[in-house]
Amino acid sequence: MAAMKTVVEFAEKAAEATATVAGKLLRSTGKAAWLVGTTGIVLAVPLIFAMNQELMQVEYEAALEAEQRTLLGAL
């Protein structure tokens, strides 16, 4: 009977340790995900705006160049 109690105590301690490690891992994973997410937002959003502005500038220049070619070709 004493051996059975020892096995049960061992299993309880092992389960408690596993739960503690899992909780710590979950918290640290959540912190890491928050860090990566916020860093991505802080860096990606301005980059997207800059890329969009650059694309609009290139399109404007292409349209302007096409208009100039049309005007010069008409003369």
Image (cartoon, rainbow, N blue to C red):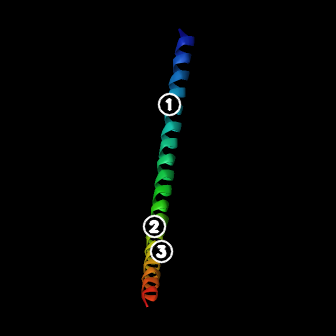
Q: Position of residue 23 (x, y in %)?
A: 48, 40
Q: Position of residue 57 (x, y in %)?
A: 45, 78
The image shows residue 58 at horizontal and vertical percentages of 48, 76
Disc assigned to residue 8:
none
Q: Residue at x 47, y 83 (%)?
A: 69
Q: CA distance from mark 1 to mark 3?
A: 56 Å
Q: Are marks 3 and 2 in contact (CB under 8 Å)?
A: no
Residue nearest the observer in this picture, 37 or 8: 37
Which tag is nearer the camera, tag 1 or tag 3? 3
Q: Earlier in the sequence, mark 1 or mark 3?
A: 1
Task: Give the amino acid type for the residue marked by disc 2 in the picture.
Answer: Ile
Q: Which residue is mark 2?
A: 48
**Residue 54 numbered tag:** 3
Vertical order, 25 against 64 (above or below): above
Q: Which residue occupies the foreground of this view, 7 or 32?
A: 32
Q: Secondary structure at mark 3?
A: helix
Where 1 sits versus 55, above or below?
A: above
> Which residue type carries mark 1?
Glu
Callout 2 secondary element:
helix
What crowding class fits label 3: few (fewer than 14 Cα within 10 Å), some (14-19), or many (20 or more)?
Answer: few
Label disc, if present, on residue 16 of the rendered structure: 1
